[in-house]
Image (spheres, rainbow, N blue to C red):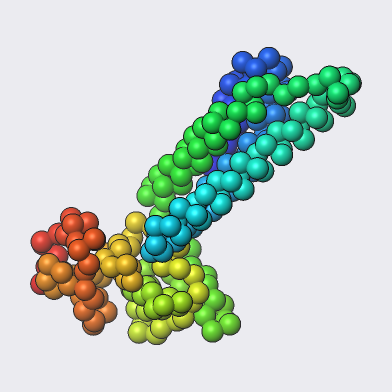
Amino acid sequence: MVAYWLVAIFLTAVLLMSLDYDLWVAALMSLSFLPAALALSFFLPKVERTSDGKRRVLDTAYIILGVMMMTFLLIYMWQYFFITFIYAVDYSKWSLPAMLGNPVFVAAILAILAYGNYLIVKWLDKKYPADHPVTFTSDYKKVSLRKQDILVVESRDSEVWITARDGRQYRNKTGIGQWENLLGSDFIRIHRSFLVQIADAVLSASDMVSIGGKSIPVSRKYKDSVLEILGEDRQQ
């Protein structure tokens, strides 16, 4: 990840050199994109997928708006610092390069940086699967479970219930969409309210999955992906 962001900053600096910045100034100016790109990478995947379309659009818009405001603030702060203190130029005579004031240009850089981070994280998770426990709060207590010890995540109105391999259940306020992002490719969404461990899930019918001694329905929305991943050979 460190290598990716170093390369990303360098390439952004090379791009900014086309705006008549010196290399070292362009490198430092490229750092103004780093916090916003990291924020975009962190918050955007947390948009609740199970909420209605209008809510998802609004949440996504708020995140993008906040990230863009952060980026422009940092750009102006960095530019002001270099112009005033490094080059000792009268600030009243200073003007920002037009491209750095262009929201489309700035948004494109942020999107590329964030998407690159997403691809690297996904690749690392697949190549080096971690056995780190998942830590969450249940009934005001901290709980740590290994991913392989979680069988089912079920959304129940304002709460999510986590069923462990030993049969214990834990209540949590984190949305099921965020749990889906957290648990990753070892789990599959079979219903808007259910997320299950792939290794333990068995197709008991084309629209039903058995896991941990219970049967869970498969909704039409997820039926194709469930059949593709679990396969006919996993059907009882």
| Image position of 107 (left or right of 89) | left
Q: Position of residue 164 (x, y in %)?
A: 38, 78
Quadrant in which residue 103 is drawn: top right
**Along the line of sight, which residue is nearer the eye, 170 or 101?**
101
Q: Nearer the viewer, residue 228 or 222?
A: 222
Q: Residue at x 70, y 29 (%)?
A: 29
Above-or-below relation of 139 to 224: below
Name the residue at 80% across, 21% down.
Answer: 94
Q: Where does the image place residue 21, in percent across and percent down from the top left?
A: 70, 18
Total count of labels: 0
Residue sitting at x 32%, y 71%: 194
User: Does residue 128 lie above or below 74 as drawn?
Assistant: below
Quarter of the rendering occupied by the C terminus: bottom left
Q: Position of residue 135 (x, y in %)?
A: 52, 70
Instruction: Tell me where residue 170 sits by quadrant.
Output: bottom left
* As drawn, 211 above or below 110: below
Expressed as whole percent of the image width and height from the top left, the position of residue 182 reads 45, 61
Left or right: 172 in relation to 231: right
Which of the pair 81/68 is nearer the observer?
A: 68
Instruction: Determine whether, in the image, residue 64 is placed left or right of residue 236.
Output: right
